[in-house]
Image (cartoon, rainbow, N blue to C red):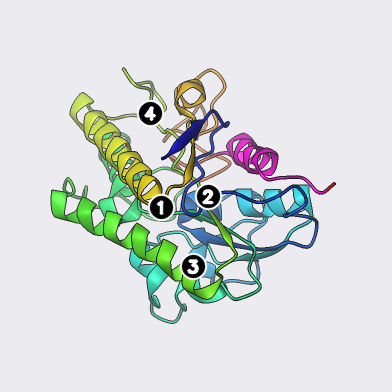
Amino acid sequence: MLRVIPVLLLAVFARPLHAEPGSFPPGTAYVAMGSSFAAGPGLGAMRADIDPRCYGSIENYPHKLARLRGFELTDVSCSGAQTIHVLNAWKELPAQLDAVGPGTQLVTITIGGNDLGYIGGLIQASCAAAGPNPASTWGCRDIPPAPTEAEFQIVEQRLSQILKGIAARAPDAHAVFVTYATVLPAYGLCAQAPLTPEQAALARTIAAKLEAITRRVAEAAQATLGDAAALRRLHHACADIPWMTGYLDDGGVHEAMPYHPNDAGMDAIAEAIAAALPLQE
């Protein structure tokens, strides 16, 4: 039975968190995997320990969580990564799962959006309407087509494979799937999101289906799910206090890539995970 608990911006999936208090003390071996929503492109100093194309920051939620709790972090998150890159090598980069070993105690994963053209579609649709974002290093590209049902099914299958891969490499590890923070308001748009209603509707559909897929994978694993729906509505890219960058602001330059968590958003995610994990007595 899936347990649903209110947790700020956090969705806990995979293996149930049955840990006793003190199970995640300072020094916990922690592996972070995922795409740019984990890597934190454009937030503060870039990491020197990864391939530059991964565009990862030391201010992403894995690093913030590690600092909050004193964890020993191995961060293999990479901007642009898809579910297949967690499972298998990506050119010269090893499979992200390869970072998980027998001593791993905690794993976080944020993945699936790039498989479906989710954030890339938002950026390219906005680029077509408003021109290239000054914070980006590339121009406008073709807007990706809407994902097919078969592509959603592949994501679901791979999320399940990721859980099995973690369990095979680290049977005692606790896996936490952190969902994609909400980008757009439920209704309407704003200057920070130059999209047509149809483009916004497609993005909302992709986000909802990806969340539903992850929920099903969690339920199949009898996992714990943190439901952040109520709080997400308050901090989208058009909100008064956003935890998400839009495409354009007054100066056209962001502290992070367009349609990605900003520093406050990364803080909120890290603090939510830290609060959900048992403290050392």
Residue under pointer 3? 167
Name the residue at 44% across, 33% down.
246
Q: Amino acid at mark 3?
A: Ala
Residue under pointer 2? 16
Where, quadrant-wise, is the N terminus in this rendering? top left
The stretch in magenta equals 262-280
In this picture, residue 79 sits left or right of residue 189: right
Count of marks, rendered view: 4
Q: Amino acid at mark 1?
A: Ala
- In reply to whether residue 37 is colored magenta, the answer given is no
Q: Is residue 99 visible?
A: yes
- Mark 2 near mark 1, Cβ–Cβ under 8 Å? yes
Q: Amino acid at mark 4?
A: Leu
Name the residue at 31% across, 18% down.
187
Residue under pointer 4? 184
Q: Earlier in the sequence, mark 3 or mark 2?
A: 2
Q: Amino acid at mark 2?
A: Pro
In front here: 150 or 169? 169
Q: CA distance from mark 3 to mark 4?
A: 34 Å
In front here: 206 or 48? 206
Q: CA distance from mark 2 to mark 4?
A: 30 Å
In this picture, residue 271 sits left or right of residue 110: right
In front here: 132 or 80? 80
Q: Which mark is residue 267?
A: none
Residue under pointer 1? 221
On the image, the x and y values in percent for residue 5 come to: 53, 31
In this picture, residue 85 sits left or right of residue 245: left
Q: Earlier in the sequence, mark 1 or mark 3?
A: 3
